[in-house]
Image (cartoon, rainbow, N blue to C red):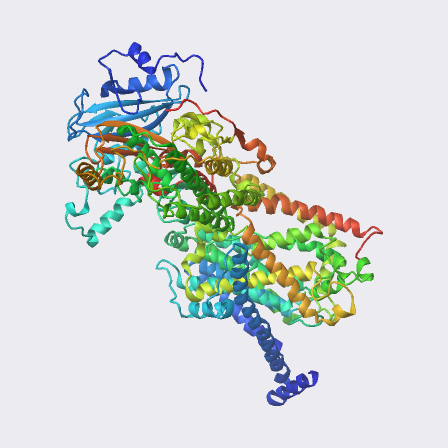
Amino acid sequence: MTIELLVFYVFAALLAFAGLRVITARNPVHAALFLVLAFFTAAAIWMLLRAEFLAIALVLVYVGAVMVLFLFVVMMLDINLDRLREGFWRYLPLGAAVGVLVVFEMALVVVAKYYASGTLPMPADPGPGYSNTKALGRLLYTDYVYPFELAAVLLLVAIVAAIALTMRRRKDTKYQDPARQAAVKRRDRVRLVSMPAEKKE
Amino acid sequence: MNELVATLAGYSSAWFGPQWGPPVWVFVKTLVLILVITLPLFGCVAYLTLAERKIIGYMQVRIGPNRVGPAGLLQPIADAVKLMFKELIIPAGANKFLFVLAPMLTLMPALAAWAVIPFGPEVVLADVDAGLLYVMAITSMGVYGVIIAGWASNSTMGFALVCVLLVSQSLNLSDIVNGQARGRFAAEGLNFLSWNWLPLLPMFLVYFISAVAETNRAPFDVAEGESEIVAGFHVEYSGMTFAVFFLGEYANMILVSALATIMFLGGWLPPIDAPLLNAIPGFFWLVLKIGFLLFCFLWFRATFPRYRYDQIMRLGWKVFIPLTIVWLVLVAAWMQTPWNPWQ
Amino acid sequence: MGAPDIPPRGIEHELAERFDAGTLRAQATADRVPTFWVQPERLLEVLRYLKRDAPGPYPMLYDLSALDERTRVHRDGQPASDFTLVYQLVSFARNADLRLKVPLTGDAPSVPSATTLWPAANWYEREVWDLFGVRFAGHPHLRRILMAPTWQGHPLRKDHPARATEMGEYRLPADKELAEQEALRFRPEDWGMRRRTDASDFLFLNLGPNHPSVHGVFRIVLQLDGEEIVDAVPDIGYHHRGAEKMAERQSWHKFIPYTDRIDYLGGSMNNLPYLLAVERLAGIEVPDRAKVIRVMVCELFRIASHLVFYGTFAQDVGALSPVFFMFTDRERVFDIVEAITGGRMHPEWFRIGGVAQDLPRGWDALVREFVRYLPPRLRDYDRMVLRNRILQRRTRGIGAYTTAEAIEWGVTGPGLRACGCDWDLRKRRPYAGYDQFEFDVPLGRNGDSYDRCAVRAEEIRQSLRIVEQCLENMPQGDYKADHPLAAPPRKERTLHDIETLINHFLAASWGPVIPPGEAYAAVEATKGLTGYYLVSDGGTAPYRARIRTPSFPHLQMIPLICRGLMIPDLIAILGSIDFVMADVDR
């Protein structure tokens, strides 16, 4: 057993544990945090496979952004656990079916290895100077530049649409125009008035 | 030095066998290096708090702490001791596990990011190729501590760094520093004019302002706005949990200052390529520059009123992001012209 | 202002033409404010006429209070009454006040509420209900305002004990404590608020009573939709000390220290309206030197108070440093005040008929140095605070109200001048010799938080001008009136004959006996118009001392100006109003 293998098993065990806790934890905040842990460990495993860009992107995007939103939602919405549990039996068949399907697919991948059919050959060790990030960037911006840009535009549209759909304007909100706020001169604001003293009491 | 390292590595192989020896040695060595980085960092945080109180005190015609030790120099120690022995109060309605986890989640990324920060040429714990990405990924996790404790922010800081990435054509922090030693002005010995801050001045400002916002410091300290929400989530923390939050926050300040130094201020490079200045160790220059930026943090706090939450969001989304995008395109175009200063 | 369509005759004639003699009955007072008695059933009609239809109308409900007449002896020619309501209105066009008195009989009297005419009547009527037990029919939320919600009785009634020792031992067992706390719980339904709409659930948030930005003990319950303030309910009374009740058992002279503590940042400035009213009742003419000394000390206190405002306003918006600089400068003011009076924040130094002592030797050097020192500092502060871009964004357009709204709600002082209304009592109705000084009146335009701050910053400079004129032109002469009712009595001749010794003994131990009558006097205090309406029944103590403070109506206005803004804006508004809770709750 090599040290890499040992590290892999440690991370794999952690990943399995975290994944299990995501679905068994009773507190939704705990579950979300275990999902964060799962992502993080998965990133570590990718790191072992020298896919450092993917690993970091996973942390950056999922842990740093997506899960933050998740947590927000979970913490802001007062989730009624009892009501969630009520649906357990109703959704069980569908859930079980999907689960079985996933297990089947994974089995296909694992089993296929033994029959040596449909598997890709192991890539050659690229050597020490190789940068995963650079290679990925080069591919994205040369061979796959149109799909990549298309995806970017799609995402942009999705962002704009999401904001447009959820935008709620209230009429009685008082809004200040910052440019006007800063543009006003002191002289326009305060003036000194010379007043005569009026009738004396 | 190298011999000593080799000898120690040899011992390790001798004790644990040829298969387990080297990994154990790497493990021990890394552990020692981590301690070598984090322990002085804690010291810096402690004395940063003293510096803050002293500097802001003098700015506000006060004296600041002056009772513990000569000129108050032992104040941070006294504070640390006090915080260690204070009772940990956990609010009745709080989830104990999350409540204690939150400060740790703030501190952890603030420390982990230091792994890739170069303190000098070749002096870095992990010389990762994607160092910049690593830092971004790790610091993006810092938000968990605050969110669990009650609040969250949004980042425009990383975006400003893309320009740096563009001109240095590397994600490796050491390469970025070394890249700043080259250029038109550096050829004439005026190193400091070749550093990224001048050609990328708008990005430097955007980065630094975002960094102040990212670390929840005045004038963007809405998460603990004294006059509005009275220190916010800090109110509920006491003793060591509060201390850990505090450590994380200040470690973050030092971290973003260190990053700014590396990205824009030439890292460990001396300002002028003169033999006398070159003789001074690079580490000194790095600390000097970080110290200057930290001073700016304190200076801001003593000077500016607080932004309102939506005004910060406006600044980030409507000012900084468009500015960054435009500048990014400009720099990219600039690099294609004969006047490219980065060659 | 002086609109041309106002008949030169007084309002007496207009009212006599419009209403028959049975409705309105005039009464003479020592302050010569036109005073009329009106029956409760005709009250609203008269008020409406005065506010809307009268030529040169009275648009501001300046004060609304009451007095318990049941033990009063000297009521010559006044209608029979157990309780009397006193409405005081201000006409800006006429530059005149008008007082309406409503006689009420019985133990639980009731009058129609004026809240439909003036929104500002709301709190005043609650206060009268709280302290006198007079009901106002048609009031939307007639409940206690200054006293605790669980209080028994109405404290300003003459039969209510004035001292805690008259009330039996106070105990707070656990169940009572719980009940007291429960009584303070905010129930939105009580205030006609909904907890949710179809679009959103509202959050109800207690800001205060202990919060660093509410400047004392002041609670505002906020109805929030997300970050936005939908409505607010200010809750006052946590600082109520019963100053008006105390006045009824202190001698005229001994009440002076209590006035210092009404607006505790205004120091001696608070003595002035009280003493002006007493002197009016007693017919004392104050010598010139005493007048100028009073003006100088008052303006020094205005500077001190405005410096506190300036610094804390910046601090509320988040700038931490200015407050330290300004408090340091305020110390310099206090050093001068200390040299002159011996006290600092509350010198209680003015006396009936003058001031306590003559100016000490060397006072002019101190004042001269300060007058030279402050202007460059003020320029620095303007750069630091008013010209700061972040502060401008936090305060411009925040918490704005118009002149009309300000008058409707009873706003006075810098808050009114920030809207552009040139109403400064020192100019309009010069008291205490202010007509002899040259100074300008700073006016704002927009009535927002920024303008309120800018107006005050400029007022500091004008106050410095006045102080400088005091310094250069201090008249010679007596520092106290030579009048038998001036207190403490003069001592020079007491050892010469027994008559003056007896008089001195009585005047010193009992205090002066002020002739029966009613008088009102107001000053342009640091925060707005502070006025004392004093009723003497020919005794050694006031029969009733009504203290009209500016901060009370200013706080009442908060919901109006903070709706649709965010909590940080509310903090900026609170800072810009410049109130102290002692000035609100008394």
Residue C172 or residue C159, whichever sits in front: C159
Q: Position of residue A11 (x, y in %)?
A: 56, 71
- Residue B160 visible to the viewer: yes
Farthest front residue in view = C496
Q: Is residue C427 left or right of residue B42?
A: left
- Closer to the camera in the image, C514 or C310: C514
- Name the spot of residue B69 as percent of width and height, x first: 48, 70
Q: Is residue C507 above or below residue B187?
A: above
Q: Is residue C483 above or below residue C204?
A: above
Quadrant into which the C terminus of chain A falls: top left
Q: Please count the marks in the image.
A: 0
Please identify the residue farthest to the bottom as the structure is shown. Answer: B14
| Residue C410 lies in quadrant | top left
Position of residue C399 in the picture relative to residue A186 (left or right): left
User: Where residue B76 appears, x then y in whole percent?
Assistant: 49, 67
- Tell which of C133 and C12 is nearer to you: C12
Answer yes or no: is residue A19 visible: no
Residue B39, percent across and down? 55, 72
Residue drawn at 16 percent across, 47 percent down: C165
Which quadrant does the N terminus of chain A fall into?
bottom right
